[in-house]
Amino acid sequence: MKTNEEVWSIVNALKALYPDSLCSLEYEKDYELLFSVRLAAQCTDERVNKVTPALFARFPTLESLAQADVAEVEQYIHSTGFFRAKARDIVLSSQMLLRDYGGKVPGTMEELLKLPGVGRKTANLMLGDVFHVPGVVVADTHCIRITGLLGLTDGSKDPVKVEMQLRQVLPPEESNDFCHRMVLHGRAVCIARRPQCESCTLRPWCDHFAKNSQPPSE
């Protein structure tokens, strides 16, 4: 595992590389981010950003989404995949937010996990981006893969295990932005099928690079 100094070196290198660590999903209201994250499951953020403007124009309030016909919501989000489950979760979550949470997205893990379709990844993203809770870790596929390659985790593919391991090593005040930067790095440099190791600024601290750049033994 990495030393504290190595962890900070990785954090600071990513900061320099991606000074803006904003979530790539576009939204105006807290609940819009919540539903956009739900739509992003097994779908790209780019596709979600193309779908949500029309969806939220048709249903501009939480009340209108709560009263929406699930079949009509399906039509707007069809291209994101798994549209039936996603549409149902959006409508049911809207109803629950109004009924149980006063029309506001709750600010605790326990409350968020009660919402239909919300898992730890979504809950952590909401806690980090909306409520700015320190120490949250959004263990998405990029984060799981790259932190394993770096050696920040033991290489587990289990999102909960990766989240807990990263919570132990990342500075709490940096963890949310770090996860957003992992996504950006996974799209731009550490690409799953063709990682650009030779041009990666994280090479000095990457276990995967160190192991694969060793000269063959004689």
Image: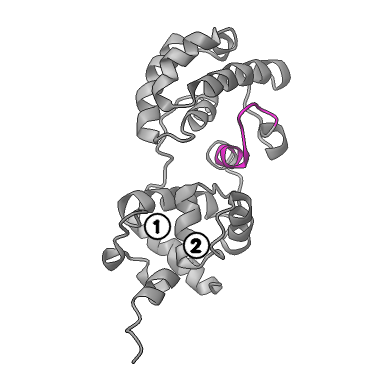
Residue 127 appears in the figure: yes
Q: Position of residue 139 (x, y in %)?
A: 54, 49
Q: Is residue 3 above or below residue 196?
A: below
- The residue sitting at 42% across, 69% down in the picture is 208
163 is higher (above) or lower (below) than 33: below
Residue that badge 1 annotates: 15
Q: Nearer the viewer, mark 1 or mark 2?
A: 2
Secondary structure beneath label 1 = helix
In percent of width and height, residue 96 lies at 68, 19
Residue for point 48% across, 53% down: 143
Q: Nearer the viewer, residue 82 or 107?
A: 82
Tell me the amino acid under the disc marked 2.
Gly
Residue 118 screen position, x and y as percent: 61, 32
The magenta span reads: 114-126
Tell me which amino acid carries mark 1. Lys
For the C terminus, the quadrant is bottom left
- How is the rendered protein coloured? one colour
Badge 2: how crowded within 10 Å, few (<14), some, or many (20+)?
some
User: In terms of secondary structure, where does tag 2 sit?
Assistant: helix
Residue at x 73% of width, y 20% of height = 100
Q: Residue furthest left?
A: 199
Q: Residue furthest bottom?
A: 218
45 sits to left or right of 126: left
Q: Is residue 59 visible?
A: no
Residue 28 forms part of the magenta stretch = no
Residue 73 image position (x, y, % from top left): 48, 13
| Circle 1 Cα neighbour tier, 10 Å, few/some/many (<14 / 14–19 / ≥20) | some
- Label drawn at residue 184: none
What residue does disc 2 label?
Answer: 148
Viewer-nearest residue: 215 or 103? 215
